[in-house]
């Protein structure tokens, strides 16, 4: 299975997607859409919309999706089997107010 995850380096939704990948022991490409504008442009072009996370699984784009929704898609399509592993972070949650405040202090520069 080829998985490309268009994610923010630090984000509740993005971290939820990463947690699901770890839960199922899946290899995936973690594409930074914040620090590389070409990556963001690729995500928008492929997904047809600007919101993240977006996860492409074997050519199928799941746009603006939570980790929980990614897992449901994979289970429903027999790509993974349900398991009892408990993710270490929420898989369906936005950043906390504290995380948003911390991110707002960082300067993002595109090269």
Image (spheres, rainbow, N blue to C red):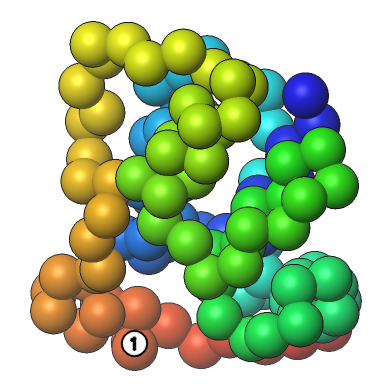
Query: Where the C terminus falls, by quadrant?
Result: bottom right
Where residue 11 sits in the image (x, y, percent)? 37, 64
Q: Nearer the viewer, residue 59 or 93?
A: 59
The image quarter in which residue 77 lies: top right
Single out the residue that lies furthest toward the left: 97
* Residue at the (62%, 22%) spot, across then down: 79
Query: Where the N terminus falls, by quadrant?
Result: top right
- The answer to whether residue 39 is above or below residue 71 is below
Label 1 CA crowd tier, 10 Å (few <14, some 14–19, many 20+): few
* Residue at the (34%, 87%) spot, across then down: 105
Q: Nearer the viewer, residue 29 or 76?
A: 76
Q: Nearer the viewer, residue 21 or 63?
A: 63
* Residue at the (73%, 41%) spot, across then down: 57
> Label 1 belongs to which residue?
105
Where residue 16 sits in the image (x, y, percent)? 36, 47
Res. 93 visible in picture: yes
Label 1 residue SS: loop
Res. 36 visible in picture: no
The image quarter in which residue 44 lies: bottom right
Where residue 73 sits in the image (x, y, percent)? 52, 41
């Amino acid at each position: 299975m080829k998985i490309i995850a268009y994610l923010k380096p630090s984000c509740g939704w993005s971290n939820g997607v990463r947690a699901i990948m770890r839960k199922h022991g899946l290899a995936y490409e973690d594409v930074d859409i914040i620090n590389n504008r070409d990556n963001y442009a690729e995500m928008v072009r492929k997904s047809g919309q600007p919101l993240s996370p977006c996860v492409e699984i074997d050519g199928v784009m799941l746009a603006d999706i939570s980790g929980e929704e990614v897992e449901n898609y994979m289970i429903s399509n027999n790509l993974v089997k349900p398991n009892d592993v408990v993710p270490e972070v929420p898989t369906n949650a936005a950043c906390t107010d504290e995380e948003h405040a911390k991110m707002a202090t960082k300067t993002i520069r595109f090269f």
